[in-house]
Amino acid sequence: MRERLVTVGLVMLGFGCSGESPVAPTPSPEPPESNTVTITASGVSPQNIQIQVGERVLFVNNDTVVHDMSSDDHPSHLTCPELNQVGFLSPGQSRETGNFVTVQTCGFHDHLDAQNPGLLGTINIVE
């Protein structure tokens, strides 16, 4: 058994010292643009965002009041149910949508202030 371990070890050393130059690691691809919507006292930013099919969007509440981010149409919120996973955000909280799996444009709003133009936006899902 010991001879077998020594042989395996020597064979492995031979592979590690074959005289070939080590291959440099391939750099990771750049991350996609930020899929983040920030909520402040001024409204949401950006109001329009484009993402790829399968991605999510992070909503961050940097305001001092609660927001309830939901899919259009108000009050049914049925257009893009992935958005409804964000829901109720207290100041300082953040939450992601579900994965968007359909090419479409999804409108969103703050259910607590549905007519406020600063709290309206769209997510364009593309391939």
Image (tube, grey):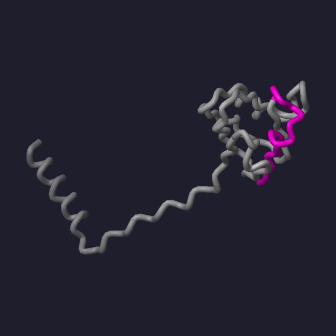
Range covered by the magenta-colored residues: 111-127
- Name which residue lies at 40% across and 64% down: 25
Given residues 71 and 104, the one toward you in this image is 71
On screen, residue 54 above or below 94: below
Which quadrant of the structure image shows residue 75? Answer: top right
Work out whether residue 22 can be spotted: yes
The percent coordinates of residue 105 (x first, y second) are 85, 46
Does the magenta segment cover residue 118? yes
Where is residue 66 shown, x and y percent of the image? 70, 27
Q: Is the C terminus in the top left, top right, bottom left or bottom right quadrant?
A: bottom right
6 or 81: nearer the viewer? 81
Residue at the image point whose x is 91% and y is 32% from the top: 73
Does the segment drawn in magenta span residue 67?
Answer: no
For the point 31% across and 69% down, the residue is 22
The answer to which quarter of the image holds residue 116 is top right
Give the residue displayed 76% in from the left and 32% down from the top: 69
Q: Name the residue furthest left.
A: 2
All told, the count of numbered labels is: 0
How far across and down, in percent of the image, does residue 111 sit? 82, 28
Q: Nearer the viewer, residue 63 or 67?
A: 63
From the viewer's perspective, is residue 38 above or below residue 16?
above
Picture coordinates of residue 82, whole percent (x, y): 76, 33
Tell which of 43 and 106 is nearer to you. Answer: 43
Instruction: Left or right? Give the position of 33 relative to 70.
Output: left
Position of 53 relative to 75 (above/below) = below
Quadrant, the N terminus: top left
Question: Is residue 56 at all visible to an observer of this figure?
Answer: no
